Amino acid sequence: MTKKYLVKFNCIVGEYEHLTSYIFDKKMTEYGYCKKFWGLEKKHELKTNVFWDNFMENAIEVYSETELTKDQYNTMQKLGVA
């Protein structure tokens, strides 16, 4: 099994913030994760490692990154999370 990474994002939409998660197949930079997850076309940095969306109205940042073991990933698949 290739390594899997559980990345939690802090999404800032207007004045509303929420956390969401996504599993990636490879390790990336914080910008790389945000780019792939939100489909960013250009690196518009609001502040260090906090990036605007394509319309510069909302922002996203990596909240945490965890390398998953094979057992953790398999459990997440069984639970329907991955």
Image (cartoon, rainbow, N blue to C red):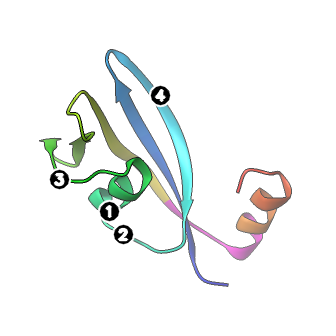
16 left or right, relative to 40: right
Q: Amino acid at mark 3?
A: Lys
In the image, residue 51 sits, relative to residue 3, either above or below, namely: above
Q: Is residue 47 visible?
A: no
Query: How far apart are the two marked residues, 2 and 4, measured between alpha carbons?
Result: 22 Å
Q: Amino acid at mark 2?
A: Met
**What residue is disc 3 on?**
43
Q: Residues within 10 Å of mark 3 (few under 14, many from 20)?
A: some
**What residue is disc 4 on?**
18
Query: Which residue is located at x 35 percent, y 28 percent?
Result: 12
Query: How far apart are the two marked residues, 3 and 2, measured between alpha carbons?
Result: 15 Å
**What residue is disc 2 on?**
28
Pair 1/4: label in front:
1
Q: Residues within 10 Å of mark 1 (few under 14, many from 20)?
A: few
In the image, residue 63 sits, relative to residue 33, either above or below, namely: above
Q: Which residues are magenta?
A: 66-72
Query: How far apart are the two marked residues, 3 and 1, measured between alpha carbons?
Result: 10 Å
Mark 2: which secondary structure? loop
